[in-house]
Image (cartoon, helix red, strand yellow):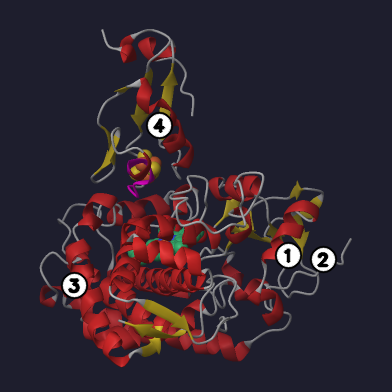
Amino acid sequence: MNDFGFDPLDPVVWQNPWPYFARGRDEFPAYRHQDTLARSVSVFRHEDVSAILKDWETFSSSSPADMNEGGLGELASLMAEDPPEHTRLRDHVRGAFSLAAVKGYAAAIERLADEILDELLERGTFDAAADYAGQLTARTILTVLGLPASDWRRIREWTVRGAANVTRSHFVREAEPEADRSVEAIFTEMAAYLDGFVHQADALPDGSLLRSLVQAAPGADRLSPRELRALAALTLLAGNETTTTLLAGAVLTLEQRPNQARALRAEPELAASAVEETLRFRPPVPALPRRATRNLTLHGVEIAKDDNIVVWLASANRDQRVFSEADQFDIRRGLSPQAISFGRGVHTCLGMPLARLEGRIGLERLYRRTRAIELLEPSPPLVLAPGVYAFERLPVRVTP
Amino acid sequence: MSAADEPGRGLRVIVDPGVCLGGGQCELICPDVFEVSYVSRVRVEHVDPLHADAVRTAADACPSGAIRILDGDMAKGGGEPRT
Ligand code: HEM
Ligand code: SF4
């Protein structure tokens, strides 16, 4: 019964994890990893993934105090809190990232996409992940926060390295002190960078998110400078590689299926629908970690208090119990209400409307302004990180 | 009397503003009924049967469980929420 051997850190598995997910759903709906340092259980069925994410009391997002290494440490903010503290933090940013607030960014994102494309189309050959998607998302989130968009390379570098570490610790077989130290170094650099802005909020652009958070009406429940810094860091970290991966993943998935790419080029208004299908088919965040707060049994697997549970969104989104023709990529499918690409429950992605907007505009502008996109590597190498299904690179040649 | 007001046919929908996350799944699925500003707001509490399926889909898709549907006869007197 232990011959399943699903190891997300095996590059061969990671390049094509889908058959593993299918087998996991059918035969190993809860699977205890055998040789991992941490006690980790993977969960594959839609029904279980959804139920676990909604039950924050049994499946906590906080780590026990002695298990914080490799995590976001001081920068973890609301992603690593449970209610009621989580609710308090989230209430501060709920409005600023709500669907209505985010609609106001559409024109600016469109201008930015066009400005980036002006240069890239001139070049003809570029990295669709870093040069296009990565630049667009990094500059967008910096602008939203009110930080200098010209810092985008630095932010991207931090978030790419940070993302490579997400959820990795659940599957490693031996300690990686060097990797842990390098991630710690990123967070220290980021904290120092953000501190400067938090302490000089007057210099930030009017109406920018960071400025309005810092200057929240006195008397209201204010965030401390440490909390502000952590929230800003979290939005930078959570909003960059994920959205980059969405846009780059859409390009790859489309161009691997010429008739789907043709359909989008013929009708660029399908971009929103294509983004939804990419989110379902190839979710940028394939897995989320939780911690059991009590002993329990799941599909016959005994889970002890403090065991790690990793729920596989990428598997849930292909569950044939829920989606018809789940393994078919069809840009006309549109929003799948059952897809779990942005999580479920109290921690559901704060940046969901912004990510959708950036994805839609980024894809639409690219397809409106090109006549053809050629993948220079048919299966581009992936970053070995279970937390973000990201690309090392996605080289393309485009015909304007 | 519109169809929505007829006992047994109408559907009443409410959003709990304390639970709503503001991400707008509901508006994307059924913009005729839901509109998100700071949090989601229900434009029309008594939903036209035309939108009943979309409202149920939105309630299922709501990641926070903020949408409650009060069904059929119960729509009149409040009744137990059905989500
Ligand atoms: C396609 C792009 C994105 C995807 C797939 C994605 C996915 C997710 C997922 C699955 C979660 C749930 C984490 C959990 O349950 O532990 C999450 C949380 C979060 N996301 Fe995103 N995200 C994306 C873009 C963004 C953007 C653009 C932002 C910018 C604000 C952002 C900010 C956050 C924050 C702050 C959280 C933590 C929310 C909480 O714990 O309450 N995300 N994201
Ligand atoms: S889907 Fe639910 S949480 Fe999201 S805006 Fe609508 S009511 Fe609020």
Callout 2 secondary element: loop
Q: Amino acid at mark 1?
A: Tyr
Q: Earlier in the sequence, mark 2 or mark 1?
A: 2
The answer as to whether the residues below labels 1 and 4 share one chain is no
Q: What range of the chain is rendered magenta?
A: B22-27
Q: Earlier in the sequence, mark 2 or mark 3?
A: 2
Q: Position of residue A137 (x, y in %)?
A: 33, 74
User: In the image, what residue occupies the spot 72% across and 58% down?
Assistant: A22
Callout 4 secondary element: helix
Q: List the residue tagged with mark 3.
A: A111
Q: Which mark is residue B55?
A: 4
Q: Could you give the CA–CA distance between mark 2 and mark 4, rounded to whole angstroms?
A: 41 Å
Residue A10 in view:
no
Q: Earlier in the sequence, mark 3 or mark 1?
A: 1
Is residue A278 shown above or below A242?
A: above
Q: List the residue tagged with mark 2.
A: A4
